[in-house]
Image (cartoon, rainbow, N blue to C red):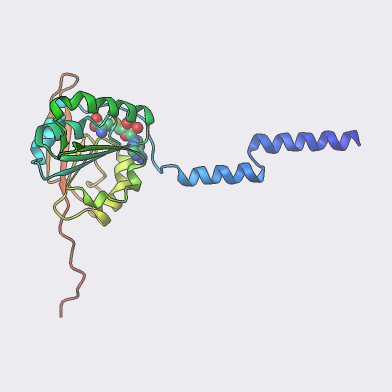
């Protein structure tokens, strides 16, 4: 009797350690389903000189709505709002960065520089979430990012399906593999920028092309 109880305890311990209980197993599966497909927490803010180059290449103006995918402290959207009076949405998975973005608001909103209207609505929004799951990405007129190519490869099909023709995409340093796969959009322009930390930042810009008509010629 004692031997059987002992064996049961060992089995229960082994199952608990390997996460094999039904509840635990289900929860694990659920968490996995909700996890972002890509979530590399590396945070290196884009240098101001590079951001200025992105603004120049993208011809950013007051009418734009900028989305920063993996926005970190969201400084790109805040800088654009202050300089052009345009709106911005930054999305970020790391709550530490979201906190920093909230501090950025105070830093940039001196003299109400980044609010509008009689009730002073903020021009910039910072969201805690997954950049690969943004339902309203199609509202963007400009998308910026400083993300590794693995992210960009995952995001390209979303861009193709949801972005409006004419939307500008600006990326710091990285691209999807357009050189070996001609079905992937090639940049329309690139530039090399010097900052105080290094002299070879790359900025790449794409413009979303018109959708090809699917109507067969009669
Ligand atoms: C290199 S930083 C770029 C920050 C900012 N865009 C800039 O250029 O200054 C990349 C950021 O993307 C965030 N990130 C990684 N995967 C993400 C995802 N799936 N959705 C949203 N943010 C993500 C990281 O936490 C990190 O803060």
- x and y percent of residue 105 in the render? 23, 28
Quadrant housing the C terminus: bottom left
Q: Quadrant of residue 121?
A: top left
**Residue that appears at 37% across and 36% down:** 93
Q: For residue 191, say whether it is visible.
A: no
Quadrant housing the N terminus: top right
**Residue that appears at 68% across and 36% down:** 16
Q: For residue 53, say whether it is visible.
A: yes
Q: Quadrant of residue 14?
A: top right
- 47 or 109, which is in the foreground? 109
87 relative to 8 in the view: left or right: left
Q: Quadrant of residue 90?
A: top left
Above or below, comparing residue 138 to residue 202 in the picture: below
- 152 or 87, which is in the foreground? 87
120 relative to 94 in the view: left or right: left
Q: Splitting the image into four quadrants, where does ligand 1 fall?
A: top left
């Amino acid at each position: 009797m004692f031997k059987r109880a002992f064996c049961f305890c060992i089995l229960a311990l082994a199952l608990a350690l390997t996460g094999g209980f039904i509840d635990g197993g289900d929860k694990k599966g659920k968490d996995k389903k909700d996890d972002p497909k890509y979530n590399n927490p590396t945070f290196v803010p884009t240098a101001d000189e590079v951001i200025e180059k992105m603004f120049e290449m993208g011809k950013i103006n007051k009418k734009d709505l900028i989305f920063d995918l993996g926005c970190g402290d969201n400084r790109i959207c805040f800088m654009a709002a202050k300089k052009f009076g345009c709106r911005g949405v930054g999305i970020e998975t790391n709550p530490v960065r979201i906190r920093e973005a909230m501090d950025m608001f105070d830093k940039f909103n001196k003299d109400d520089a980044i609010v509008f209207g009689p009730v002073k609505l903020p021009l910039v929004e910072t969201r805690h979430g997954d950049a690969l799951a943004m339902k309203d990405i199609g509202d963007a007129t400009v998308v910026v990012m400083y993300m590794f190519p693995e992210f960009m490869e995952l995001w390209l099909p979303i861009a193709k399906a949801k972005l409006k023709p004419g939307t500008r995409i600006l990326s710091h340093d990285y691209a999807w593999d357009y050189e070996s796969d001609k079905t992937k959009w090639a940049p329309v322009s690139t530039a090399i920028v010097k900052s105080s930390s290094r002299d070879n930042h790359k900025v790449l810009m794409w413009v979303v092309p018109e959708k090809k008509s699917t109507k067969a010629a009669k």
